[in-house]
Image (tube, grey):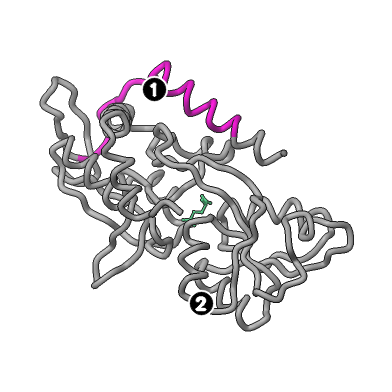
Amino acid sequence: MKKLIMSLLASAMVLSMAACGNTPASNDGSQESASGSTGEGSSFTTVVEGKLTMATNATFPPYEYVEGGNITGIDAEIAAAIAGKLGLELQIDDMQFTAITESIKNGKADIGLAGMTVTPDRQEEVDFTVSYATGIQVVIVTEDSSITSVDDLLAEGANHKVGVQLNTTGDMFTTDDVEGAGKGEVIRYDKGADAVQALKTGKVDCVVIDNEPAKAFVAENEGLKVLETEYAVEDYAAAMSKDNPALYEAVNTALQELIADGTIQGIIDKYIKAE
Ligand code: GLN
């Protein structure tokens, strides 16, 4: 319930941001970056002139992953569509998930797209666009596991080892609910795939991770399954600098238009087939 409220709170903040527009202090022009224009009178600056630099962590199928040497997936296509609308070329930089917000704050990337959940803590670091997808934290277990629901994980005396990807919401939630509540141990991995390997080799008893990568990992690894009960429902959005309101406005408007005209749903449907 706490997760749901947190998620709703985050959504409400995103919606209210969208409703009132983003009104940070004016750009003082001190940015070293080059300028661009949407051709509709609004101009903005990007980290590299003529490019939209996207920070991501390409280990999160179907949102971002490497295929044939290229980074592909829902987020890569959404970013390409936004870049196209703004007359920019898309440049994708792959990095650790934890480095994404830092690279935005340090002026190395214009936009972070990584199946990133809107959370109040992150909203202190970056501005989020409108949400473009829903994510669900789920639990992966081995087929013969004694863990059959989220409740089993959070039960008094459960004492399970839970694998997560470092600094993701799965990490944040279980750090509070499992470790903080003295109900088990959380083991953190750089990649979700590493947490899944740890589950296969018995180093952890379950993995808490987003539902779509969970499905992809289970499809690739025999003997694993995703529990039906949901741990938390979340909103994915693009992270952007708080110091570049003109670019935020241009990207957020482009994304809203791409949602309204069905482009985003079309991209999502290409990668996530209805069950
Ligand atoms: N949605 C999760 C989060 O924002 C995981 C994202 C990811 O691993 N790319 O923390």
Between disc 2 and disc 1, the foreground one is 2
Q: In this rendering, does residue 134 appear at all?
A: yes
The kind of secondary structure element at disc 2 is loop
Q: Identify the image quadrant of residue 256.
A: top left
Residue sitting at x 16%, y 41%:
84
Residue bearing mark 2? 221
Looking at the image, the residue that sits furthest to the right is 157
Amino acid on which the number 2 mark rests in the picture:
Asn
Asked if the residue at label 2 sits under 8 Å from ligand 1, the reply is no
Looking at the image, the residue that sits furthest to the front is 275
Q: In this rendering, does residue 108 appear at all?
A: no
Verify whether residue 127 appears in magenta: no
Q: What span is in magenta? A: 8-33
Mark identifier at residue 22: 1
The N terminus - image quarter: top right
Q: How many tags in the picture?
A: 2
Residue 110, how many percent across, how many down?
30, 43
Left or right relative to 180: residue 130? left
